[in-house]
């Protein structure tokens, strides 16, 4: 039994009324719409709008995983990790995150900017839309976080306190199990199409893949580099374009309840993996030009990241030891680790729990080839990153494998 009250569409007006800082943003007496729109795996999400057209989002963490129900308890304190990271990241790149209005630690509710004039990027990608600028913006976001929440920018005491309060073991355990351990070693939560049985058997028998996932999990559990988002897939990004345009005028990362001080390249790898998944869908549908465009997002994100990190680099603390040669070596390390994390993130979505709609909404006959291609690509990536981790190499490898393995 939870010891706090869950929000409902009926109680949202009173909740706003009871909090003057919210009632100043939206009129609880003239609400014209209140909808529960949570479509993620974990939380309740309400969108409210008033007669003057003002909106607000109220997100509440449940004490269990919504995807499975009460049988999988999960700390609602994850909302604190989300709000702390949203605030820290917003301070670094205000345009790329929603504004937080209030955090209620008794009921684990975050009140924040309404983004209902945006779309979830994954949905837009599935619909075949283009949102130019979104991938670069996400690279900028990760670059700002990489620098601004790290030892390059933070006072030693403040950094230690930030690391301590970011420790998020329950959410990290989900990632450690679902992303790194279970796909390659087996779990009751895994599932795949009968036609992909040989692909999964090959994947799980691949010693290089197993070694790579062990390494990736170790990095994830030991590298305390920056306050990463922790779940930066295309369903954690909102995009908006002006009417008639395909160029974004707003891009926002959200849903950072998995945030903790972890390996920076995990966020890059999550983005890369989800671009590959979007490309696999497009190849499966014989939309080759679109698939190549999806793969070009990898290059755009890396370029945005690289540019933003380099832009901030001159203001680093202790340039005595962190010189230009260090910078180049660091960027190469992150690029190679991003390949590794991308391989983990793309294969978990094919084998493990919590799959992606990009692939699941394909007819089974097409899904089989898309899954085969992604698993084959992941196996190649964990090996090839040691030879050449250029992003162009990743996109050309992905293009040839995904085009070759598609089915019809
Ligand atoms: C039990 S949560 C399953 C997945 O949903 C989240 O979005 C994360 O990706 C997590 O692994
Ligand atoms: Mg999420």
Image (tube, helix red, strand yellow):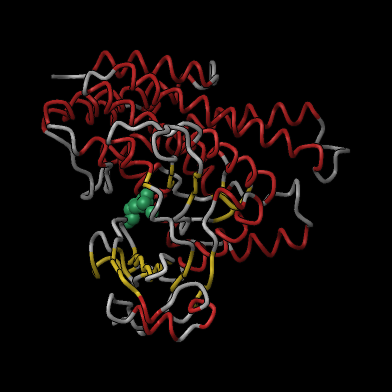
Whether residue 211 is visible here, answered yes or no, is no
- How many numbered callouts? 0
Quadrant showing the C terminus: top left
The front one of 321 and 137 is 137
**Image quarter of residue 100:** bottom right
The front one of 314 and 330 is 314
The residue shown at (40%, 16%) is 397
Q: Position of residue 27 (x, y in %)?
A: 43, 77
Q: Is residue 134 above or below residue 63?
A: above
The front one of 379 and 231 is 231
Q: Quadrant for ligand 2?
A: bottom left
**Image quarter of residue 35:** bottom left
**Image quarter of residue 64:** bottom left
Q: Position of residue 78 (x, y in %)?
A: 45, 66
The front one of 364 and 321 is 364
Quadrant showing the N terminus: bottom left
The residue shown at (27%, 80%) is 10
Q: Position of residue 128 (x, y in %)?
A: 29, 31
The residue shown at (30%, 60%) is 38
Whether residue 334 is visible here, answered yes or no, is yes
Q: Is residue 202 above or below residue 104?
A: above
Q: Position of residue 294 (x, y in %)?
A: 39, 26
């Amino acid at each position: 039994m939870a010891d706090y009250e869950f929000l409902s569409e009926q109680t949202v007006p009173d909740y706003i009324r009871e909090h003057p800082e919210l009632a100043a943003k939206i009129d609880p007496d003239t609400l014209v719409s209140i909808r529960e729109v949570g479509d993620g795996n974990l939380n309740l999400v309400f969108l409210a709008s008033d007669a003057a057209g003002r909106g607000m989002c109220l997100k509440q963490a449940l004490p269990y995983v919504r995807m499975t129900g009460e049988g999988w308890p999960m700390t609602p304190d994850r909302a604190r990790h989300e709000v702390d990271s949203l605030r820290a990241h917003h301070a670094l790149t205000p345009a790329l995150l929603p504004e937080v209005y209030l955090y209620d630690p008794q009921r684990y509710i975050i009140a924040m900017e309404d983004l209902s004039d945006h779309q979830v990027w994954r949905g837009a990608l599935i619909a075949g839309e283009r949102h130019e600028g979104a991938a670069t913006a996400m690279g900028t976001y990760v670059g700002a976080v990489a620098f601004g929440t790290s030892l390059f920018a933070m006072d030693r005491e403040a950094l230690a306190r930030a690391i301590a309060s970011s420790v998020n073991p329950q959410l990290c355990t989900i990632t450690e199990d679902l992303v790194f351990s279970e796909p390659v070693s087996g779990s009751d939560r895994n599932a795949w199409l009968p036609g992909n049985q040989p692909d999964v058997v090959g994947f799980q028998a691949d010693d290089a893949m197993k070694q790579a996932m062990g390494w990736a999990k170790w990095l994830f559990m030991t590298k305390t580099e920056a306050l990463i988002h922790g779940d930066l897939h295309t369903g954690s990004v909102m995009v908006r374009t002006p009417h008639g345009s395909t160029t974004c005028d707003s891009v926002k990362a959200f849903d950072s309840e998995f945030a903790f001080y972890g390996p920076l390249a995990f966020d890059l790898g999550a983005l890369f993996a989800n671009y590959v998944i979007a490309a696999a869908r497009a190849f499966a549908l014989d939309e080759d030009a679109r698939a190549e465009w999806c793969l070009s997002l990898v290059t755009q994100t890396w370029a945005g990241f690289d540019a933003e990190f380099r832009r901030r680099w001159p203001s680093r603390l202790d340039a005595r030891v962190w010189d230009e040669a260090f910078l180049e070596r660091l960027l190469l390390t992150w690029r190679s680790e991003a390949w590794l994390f991308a391989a983990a993130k793309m294969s978990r979505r094919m084998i493990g729990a919590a799959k992606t709609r990009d692939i699941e909404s394909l007819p089974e006959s097409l899904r089989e080839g898309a899954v085969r291609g992604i698993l084959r690509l992941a196996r190649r990536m964990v090996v090839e990153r040691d030879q050449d981790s250029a992003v162009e190499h990743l996109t050309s490898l992905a293009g040839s494998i995904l085009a070759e393995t598609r089915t019809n």
